[in-house]
Amino acid sequence: MKGLGTAALPRAYASARNGSRAWVVVDALAALPVDAGTDLASSLAHLGKRLSTLGRHDEALTCELNAVAICEDLAAADPGPHRLNLARFLTILGVRYSETRPRRLCLPGHRKAIAIYRDLIDTNQARFRTDLARALSNLDVQLSKLGRHAEAHKARSEAAAIRHDSALTP
């Protein structure tokens, strides 16, 4: 059985490996079967969260970038089951970017996640409305911190309306 290999980590893998013990885990995960891509992405996202908690923000960002890259590949090959994970990991990536990079760099990930949630809702999957509201709230926070208050207000208002509608829907 063919493994995912480090090719499943297309962005920044080689440059980020610096002898850190965290990458031993990544190497082990890369040996998983190809159909384990979602598990690998989830493990990388979890590792990113832990590294961020330890103040190792650049390594955390690398993990998140790789998790998103894996999900993008999976969603391109089979959108149905993988688009939700892509949207979730894009949201996490946006948060990671806001920790270490100029805040404006987190906006495309948030906006792409929002677009995916909208598409999921349009295909009669209303259960993703709360995910959309959460993504809009994250966008609101980042836009507010950038001083883009009109755009932030629009995102905040839409998130509030979704939450209000969800509370009224049995």
Image: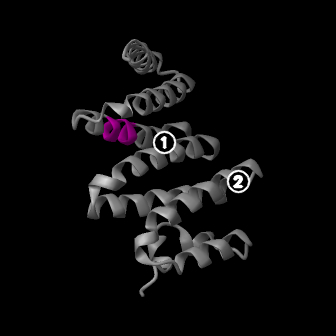
Judged from the image, the secondary structure of the residue bearing numbered disc 2 is: helix
Q: Quadrant of residue 24?
A: bottom right
Q: Are marks 1 and 2 in contact (CB under 8 Å)?
A: no
**Residue tagged 2:** 50
Mainly helix, strand or loop, the magenta region?
helix
In the depicted structure, whether residue 11 falls above or below residue 103: below
> Residue 63, percent across and down?
58, 60
What residue is at 70 percent from the left and 68 percent from the top?
Answer: 22
What residue is at 45 percent from the left and 18 percent from the top?
Answer: 156
Q: How is the image coloured?
A: one colour
**From this viewpoint, which residue is outermost toward the front?**
170
Screen quadrant of the N terminus? bottom left
The mark found on residue 46 in the picture is none
* Amino acid type for the residue under numbered disc 1: Thr
Say whether residue 137 is magenta: no
Q: How many discs appear?
A: 2
Which is nearer the eye, 9 or 35?
35
Q: CA distance from mark 1 to mark 2?
A: 16 Å
Which is nearer the eye, 37 or 24?
37
Screen quadrant of the C terminus? top left
**Residue tagged 1:** 91
Q: Quadrant of residue 162?
A: top left
**From this viewpoint, which residue is outermost toward the right?**
54
Q: Residues within 10 Å of mark 1 (few under 14, many from 20)?
A: many
Q: Residues within 10 Å of mark 2 (few under 14, many from 20)?
A: some
> Residue 120, percent across and down?
29, 39
What residue is at 48 percent from the left and 66 percent from the top?
Answer: 11
Judged from the image, the secondary structure of the residue bearing numbered disc 1 is: helix
Of the numbered discs 1 and 2, the one sitting upstream in the chain is 2
Magenta stretch, residue numbers: 111-117
> Residue 151, percent across and down?
41, 20
> Residue 55, percent across and down?
76, 50
